Image (spheres, rainbow, N blue to C red):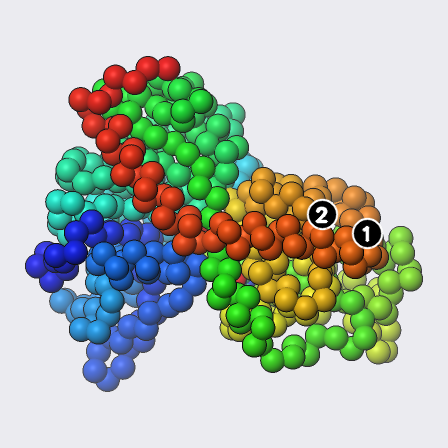
Amino acid sequence: MTPAKHSSSRGHRLIVVSNRLPVTIKRGPRGPESYRSTGGLVAAFEPTLTTHGGVWIGWPGTDLRGDEELTGPEDPYAIEPVPVSRAELKRYYDGFANGTLWPLFHSFPTQTVFQNRDWETYREINDRFAEVVGSVAERGDRVWINDYHLFLAPDAVRARRGDVPIGFFLHIPFPPYDIYRLLPWSTEVLVGLLGADLIGFHVKGYVRNFLDCAKRHLQAKVDRRRGTIELDGRTIQVAAFPLGIDFQSFEAMAESAPESPLHHGEQIILGVDRMDYTKGIPHRILAFARLLEKHPEHRRHVTLLQVAVPSRSEVPEYRYLRREIDELVGRVNGRFATASWNPIRYLYRSVPQNKLAGLYRDADVAIVTPLRDGMNLVAKEYVACQVRNPGVLILSMLAGAAETMEEAVQVNPYDVEGTADSLHMALTMPTAERQRRLDALRNRERASDVHVWATDFLESLDRARKLSRPRAATVTA
Ligand code: ADQ
């Protein structure tokens, strides 16, 4: 693709880089047709991409032939596909990203697979992404690389295009040093990341972990107060940017969503997750069963509705998890159900966003209990959709969201007994207290939405760039 195609006279174009492009490709008789997807990150980047122009670089989700193009004349910004073959995807995506980095960074070292072949492919694909960025970027552009699939891309882009500011944002946790150092390629990953001018995490805890790793692993000079790392004469800025949601859009969807078929007179506890072992679904089902044991008064009056969207079914752990949940749901329903009441309703599928908004609005309690989670947007979507009878958010203290959503009922998801008690508390909480907590949660999420997040990050990138240039790298600890 020629650089001219993406050129813009509007200045400061944004180059967004992520593993997956925000498109779904369907092959028709006229070749590939791409449909732009909506969702959190699209909402975050689209305003800047549309105002200043830009390009989104990523894997299109399918093989493209020859010079097949994805961008149409009406599209507000360009799409630049990075080809990844099926064999490469197995090693780079299923293997290294989701079999190595995902479990390790969520503090599940025993589920982590370390394979040299996967690492080699990961490195090659990161280099390929950097090559595309290098050929598309123009002087004055800003590059924003996203997530653990592309840890090596910042340094690889910098090697090619030292003239453009590079930001990196991680959507998952950054683990403590004692976990991080189990990675056989820990030095390479740190060096790859530190090619950026600005590295962003969801919360301060991950920033601390990262600074710790840079100091102990690379002996880099770290200023914890300012969040800077000095390496090879450059200064890299590290900071927390808690991701928000498109609050207004969820609120509006909840206001107009049709009545959901939830209530038959009972209270509803709602769980919404990708089917992933980090989300703590089995622990949650056990806590719900414990609630029914300890408080028989809830039997026939409370239902757990668990919606799980299929995810990463190529990775064996995800297939085991699905079986485990099927069995658990069967066991609990078999034990407590009556002829007219099933304690757990379980949907294994994706639900369209407007329907989801109706479920969020009508649920009395949302149970968001990951065993570890970078942020968790479900918790935020739930409070945005609470436009009627105030509900209660139960939130794992191990989700990044817990750092700011302090009015939620916070639980340790491993503590089944404690979570059962919190469920009881939520189901019996007086209206005034529910309203007070919810108002505070809603006000915060409204004020720190996804647009604020994107603006903050880009402004910080401009400042960080001034700091990181070698001639300005004299800042000391
Ligand atoms: P995820 O692990 O995918 O994201 P999360 O933040 O909860 O976790 O986002 C899930 C999204 O999927 C939500 O927008 C939700 O509405 C949607 N979803 C879930 N189940 C669904 C269903 N059955 N049908 C339809 N939609 C469903 C990663 C990190 C998180 C981090 C985000 C963003 O793991 O910690 O918050 O990226 O940075």
Residue type (three-letter) at the residue carrying disc 1: Met
Residue 260, position as x, y percentages in the image: 65, 77
Q: Nearer the viewer, residue 445 or 377?
A: 445
Instruction: Say which quarter of the image contains residue 472.
Output: top left
Q: Nearer the viewer, residue 12 or 238?
A: 12
At x 30%, y 65%, the residue is 62
Residue 204, position as x, y percentages in the image: 50, 34
Check the picture and name the quadrant holding the C terminus.
top left
Disc sitting over residue 194 in the figure: none
Q: Which residue is mark 2?
A: 409
Determine whether, in the image, residue 351 is placed left or right of residue 260: left
Q: Nearer the viewer, residue 438 or 161?
A: 438
Q: CA distance from mark 1 to mark 2?
A: 9 Å
Question: Nearer the N terminus, badge 1 or badge 2?
Answer: 2
Q: Is residue 113 above or below residue 245?
A: above
Determine whether, in the image, residue 48 is placed left or right of residue 383: left
- CB-based contact (under 8 Å), mark 1 and mark 2: yes
Determine whether, in the image, residue 52 is placed left or right of residue 39: left
Check the picture and name the quadrant holding the N terminus.
bottom left
Q: Is residue 35 above or below residue 476?
A: below
At x 14%, y 58%, the residue is 8
Residue 363, position as x, y percentages in the image: 69, 66
Determine whether, in the image, residue 432 is placed left or right of residue 103: right
Q: Is residue 397 above or below residue 247?
A: above
Any part of residue 277 in sight: no
Circle 1 crowding by C-alpha within 10 Å: few under 14, some 14–19, many from 20: few
Circle 2 crowding by C-alpha within 10 Å: few under 14, some 14–19, many from 20: many
Q: Which residue is mark 1?
A: 425
Whether the residue under disc 2 has CB within 8 Å of ligand 1: no
At x 65%, y 54%, the residue is 439
